[in-house]
Image (tube, coloured by chain):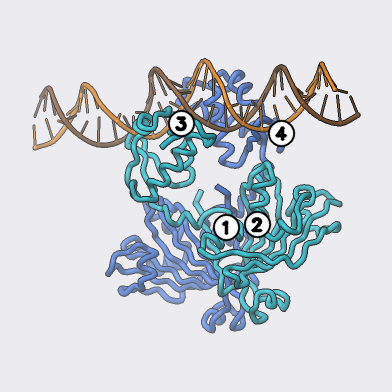
Chain colours: A blue, B cyan, C brown, D orange
Amino acid sequence: MINKQISIPIYVQIEQLLVSEIENGKYQRGDAIPSERELSESLEVSRMTVRQAINNLVSKGKLYREKGKGTFVSEQTLSYALKGLVSFTEDMKRRGLVPSTKLISFEKMNHVPDPIINKLMLSKNEAVYCLYRVRYADKEPMAVERAYLPVKLFSNLSEDSAQGSLYEFVRNEFKETIHRATQQIEAGLSTELESQHLGVQQNSPILIVKRTTYLSSGNPFEYVETVFRGEKYSFLVDVFRD
Amino acid sequence: MINKQISIPIYVQIEQLLVSEIENGKYQRGDAIPSERELSESLEVSRMTVRQAINNLVSKGKLYREKGKGTFVSEQTLSYALKGLVSFTEDMKRRGLVPSTKLISFEKMNHVPDPIINKLMLSKNEAVYCLYRVRYADKEPMAVERAYLPVKLFSNLSEDSAQGSLYEFVRNEFKETIHRATQQIEAGLSTELESQHLGVQQNSPILIVKRTTYLSSGNPFEYVETVFRGEKYSFLVDVFRD
DNA sequence: TAGGTATAGTTGTCTATACCAGTATATATA
DNA sequence: TATATATACTGGTATAGACAACTATACCTA
């Protein structure tokens, strides 16, 4: 069961053990797992080590504790499709749709508006690329988006790669990884330009997502405003309580 | 500083101490806080107790550790106010607005529509309370919502408590804690009824949030559809890459 | 029978200690 | 001067033990 010689920490081994026993059905949803003292005796480790393992699984939502009663397996049905930070391309694929993109304009902006400077944490006089793109799902227009990308990070971005997934580009060309994003979601009515590109009547309902995405260092690498067709698109998100 | 007599756990007191010293600027973003051993000596507690406090702040994102170097204050102290699962009441308070509620109707449904049964994981013939409420911010209508609550969980819900925050009610009356929610966010146009309650013209832009909220056991305790005024409200969410 | 109580079990909190594994820095050595 | 090396820090892992707070159950008593 537990190997104290190898370099994998004991509490990690206990986590893996418990997870596998949940997954193979030994402990079912709602069941109590053995008490901390029982586990510490049967695995021949200290109770605090068992607690460390259980604490991690509790914060992952796999187990929950009840004081005086025991520790139990959560009801989780967390469907993976809902979770996490995904690009438009990934999002559509998860929904079983085929994404495509039409690049409307691709320009280098030398005079960047202040709000963009702030969101991208740029210094004055830094340039950005500005992409205006229509995004399709199964060849139907789904969204239009305006993306702002710092030139210093995307110096080797071509018009060609601007047709595809920016996240793909970052994965391939950057040394750092994508870490998190803050998103502001609003509802509104479509403008004339948006309506044309989306193939809807003017003043149709639209969902506006304004997103700043950050690398693992904490530096932002894109600010994107996406306008989705309101009748076609809904935004899914999982949130957790502290 | 630390009071070992009172019933607040020492590690919670240490958390509060560190947070307040971050907020009053004693430790700035990127600064190292004192080492675990220093804190354990100066506060006259065990190092493990200090670690418990720091661990909690790390998992809240307020601090981060670097092995061999120290523990540091995270960059994102401000935007964390945006994060997490919050009730309408909490949400408005964070935005600096005063929330209030008008209860339009409060009824017990014995025949529950199938979609609601599924979302709340009910068995057939289980009843739910159905609340229809208008939510105000600074006395201006901000949203209307329809909440579905299993009677078996909310048996002691009164019309009076239905006027206030449901999350508050759960905190006070339930033994379990609120853990997570899945939310579906859509854009649309207001119906006649919604327009009346929100004080807007019909076919105004609205933001629709459909939320199922779960307890730490994984059992859902509410399904709520909230219709926000599109010009007044925007939804903020942080997402992370796996 | 209804209600209180003892008891044994659970998780929660806290201590004191030990050693490991990275990191930075001063010091000694080539 | 450049490069090892010692050493003194840091957080990471793990132990053994103690008592508190809460829960369920069996048992006793009015």
Question: Which quarter of the image is occupied by the N terminus of chain A?
Answer: top right
**Circles 1, 2 touching at the beta carbon (< 8 Å):** yes
Q: Which residue is mark 1?
A: B90
- Mark 3 and mark 1 lie on one chain; the one further toward the N terminus is 3
Q: Chain of mark 3?
A: B
* Rendered position, B185 above or below A20: below
Q: Quick check: do tags 1 and 4 share a chain?
A: no
Q: Which residue is mark 2?
A: B165
The span from disc 1 to disc 4 (Cα, nearest Å) is 33 Å
Circle 1 — which element? helix
Mark 4 vs mark 2, foreground winner is 2
- Mark 3 and mark 2 lie on one chain; the one further toward the N terminus is 3
Q: Chain of mark 1?
A: B
The span from disc 3 to disc 2 (Cα, nearest Å) is 34 Å
Q: Which residue is mark 4?
A: A31
Q: Which residue is mark 3?
A: B49
Whether residue A136 is visible, yes or no, is no
Circle 2 — which element? loop
Q: Nearer the viewer, residue A30 or A69?
A: A69
